[in-house]
Amino acid sequence: MAELTTEDTILQIKIAERIQFLRLKTGLSQTDFAQKHHIDRQVINRWESIKNKRGVTIYSIQKFCKMLDITLKDFFDDEKFNKDA
């Protein structure tokens, strides 16, 4: 597996932070969110982890978006993704 570039790592962190932010907006813990959506809590933990070397696939982001009833556009329509750092 190729080493992530600095740019890739920054994007990975932004995505993990966005997932955590949106989950926290629901008022649910990782455990409660996972139970509500019938997935393993470790999946949420992995999605929110900035240390996960594999990152999150676009398919996982889409699955998360469906759980929140938002679009991929809504997910990425955040100032976090519109600036360089």
Image: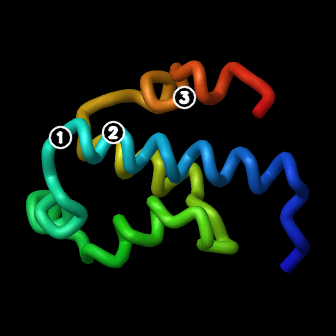
- Residue depth check, mark 1 versus mark 3: number of the one nearer the observer: 1
Q: Residue 22's mark?
A: 2
Classify 10 Å Cα crowding around label 2: few (below 14), some (14-19), many (20 and above). some
- SS label for mark 3: helix
Q: Gap between marks 1 and 3, in whole Å?
A: 18 Å
* Image position of 32 with respect to 70: above or below: below
Residue occupied by mark 1: 26
* Image position of 20 with respect to 84: above or below: below
Tell me residue 9's x, y (percent).
76, 55
Amino acid type assigned to the residue bearing label 2 in the image: Leu
Tell me residue 27's x, y (percent).
14, 44
Reading the chain from its start, which is encountered first: label 2 or label 3?
Answer: 2
- Image quarter hosting the N terminus: bottom right
Q: Residue 52's mark?
A: none
State the residue at coordinates (90%, 73%): 2
State the residue at coordinates (11%, 67%): 35
Specify whether 22 is left or right of 68: right
Specify whether 61 is left or right of 24: right
Q: Are marks 1 and 3 in contact (CB under 8 Å)?
A: no
Residue occupied by mark 3: 76
Q: Gap between marks 1 and 2, in whole Å?
A: 7 Å
- SS label for mark 2: helix
Amino acid type assigned to the residue bearing label 3 in the image: Phe
Tell me residue 36's x, y (percent).
9, 59
Amino acid type assigned to the residue bearing label 1 in the image: Thr
- SS label for mark 1: loop
Classify 10 Å Cα crowding around label 1: few (below 14), some (14-19), many (20 and above). few
Q: Are marks 1 and 2 in contact (CB under 8 Å)?
A: yes
